[in-house]
Amino acid sequence: MITNKLTYLKELKGENPLVDQAIKFIESTNLNELTEGKHEINKQMFAVKSSYETKSENIALSEAHRKYIDLQIILEGEEVIFGGDIDDYKETTSYDDKKDVAFYKGEASWKIICKKDTFAIFYPYDIHQPGVTLETAKKITKVVFKIHVI
């Protein structure tokens, strides 16, 4: 898991060629002007813009993916994301190959607070529980880039 202010995303260039492509797209696109929904970028990457209300920790689901790395960018609002290593969690809903997701239960080993203009990257071994309320439920708008694992 990697997280920081959006202005530091460019520092990751050179780590992964597909992440480099996502960064190039982000630098050349006004993400606020994207419509909600799925946006194909190329055969190995797409982005999904969505808005939702944050919820309590006991309602939000912990998830992980196998085919895609998540690059999540907060455009508006704030949320808490809990998570940890996949080996420390128990799978509660079997992996769905079509949706590239499995759900888990376990005790988080980390917590990040994501506010406007921050990003977080989650790899297949990173359980993440997004959408958790920080203080009071708030609407959040984010773009999640789904980057194929090389």
Image: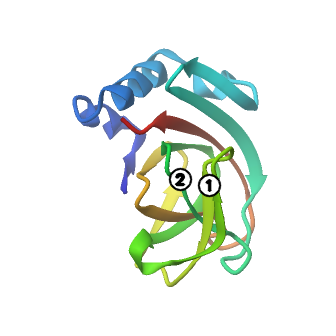
Which quadrant of the figure has residue 9? top left
Whole-percent x and y of residue 100? 61, 48
Outermost residue, bottom side: 107
Label 2: few (<14), some (14–19) or many (≥20) C-alpha neighbours in 10 Å: many
Q: Quadrant of residue 95?
A: bottom right
Name the residue nearer the viewer: 88 or 11. Answer: 88
- Three-letter code for the amino acid on which mark 1 is drawn: Val
Tell me where residue 75 appears, x and y as whole percent.
60, 40
* Marker disc for residue 38: none
Measuring from the top left, give residue 128's x and y in whole percent: 52, 63
Residue at (40%, 60%) from the top-left corner? 125
Amino acid type for the residue under numbered disc 2: His
Q: Could you tell whether 85 is left or right of 11 in the image? A: right
Q: Quadrant of the N terminus?
A: bottom left
- Residue at the (44%, 27%) spot, across then down: 22
Please rate how many residues cluster around mark 1, counting C-alpha atoms within 10 Å: few if below 14, some from 14 to 19, many from 20.
some
CA gap, disc 2 to disc 1? 5 Å
Task: Identify the residue under disc 2.
Answer: 65
Is residue 113 depicted above or below 22 in this figure?
Answer: below
Q: Nearer the viewer, residue 26 or 38?
A: 38
Q: Which mark is residue 101?
A: 1
Element carrying mark 1: strand
36 to 110, vertically: above or below:
above
